[in-house]
Amino acid sequence: MKDKIALNLPTAPLRTRQEGTRMQVFDILRQQWVALTPEEWVRQHFVHFLIEVKRYPAGRIGNEISLKVGQTKKRCDTVIYGKHGEPVIIIEYKAPSVAITQKVFDQIWRYNLPFHVPYIVVSNGIQHYCLHIDYTNNTYHFLNHIPHTEEAIG
């Protein structure tokens, strides 16, 4: 990734390096260097936003979480866990150039089937959407914000 893309997120203190012909960024959650793609640029900024602004403890956030949907293995971009280790938020990232469409929501909805989380977030770094799901009444609604840790975890 040659150019650093301006996002609708606070600037994050990301560590980057050149490894051969590829740029890498240090993922503070996985504690490893990963390829710096436009989607990863969004993920790293969003994770810093969750920790620094929304006050989620880093120990309750996981990146690239494997799950099984039917017979297919998938990876959830980010999962935030509650007080008892239960998933409470799943997040899907797209590159800033990728529009957030119904197809993206369908993808994360399928990913949520094994989790049954109360919050789903989708972001391309420019636009952020958060759904709150009410399983009792079988409804959902869009929030105009990303919940703070107290709202989502308690």
Image (cartoon, rainbow, N blue to C red):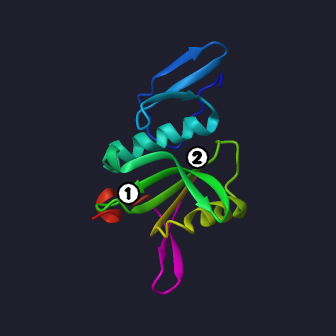
Residue 105, x across and y down, in percent: 64, 63
If you read the primary sequence from the N terminus, does the residue marked by circle 1 or circle 2 appear first? 1
Residue range corresponding to the magenta coloring: 127-145
Q: Quadrant of the N terminus?
A: top right
Residue 29, x across and y down, in percent: 41, 38
Look at the picture and state if 99 lies above or below 35.
Answer: below
Residue under label 1: 81
Q: Which mark is residue 126?
A: 2
Left or right: residue 103 versus residue 119 is right
Label 1: which secondary element: strand
Alpha-carbon span between mark 1 and mark 2: 25 Å
Residue name at image x 63 percent, y 65 percent: 110
Residue 21, x across and y down, in percent: 67, 15
Nearer to us in this view, 15 or 82: 82
Q: For residue 154, which quarter of the picture? A: bottom left
Total label count? Answer: 2
Left or right: residue 97 versus residue 143 is right
Amino acid on which disc 1 is placed: Tyr
Amino acid on which disc 2 is placed: Ile
Please identify the dominant SS of the magenta region. Answer: strand
Mark 2 packing: few (<14 Cα in 10 Å), some, or many (20+)? some
**Which residue occupies the extreme top position in the image?**
20
Q: Nearer the viewer, mark 1 or mark 2?
A: 1
User: CB under 8 Å between callouts 1 and 2?
Assistant: no
Look at the picture and state if 153 lies above or below 22.
Answer: below
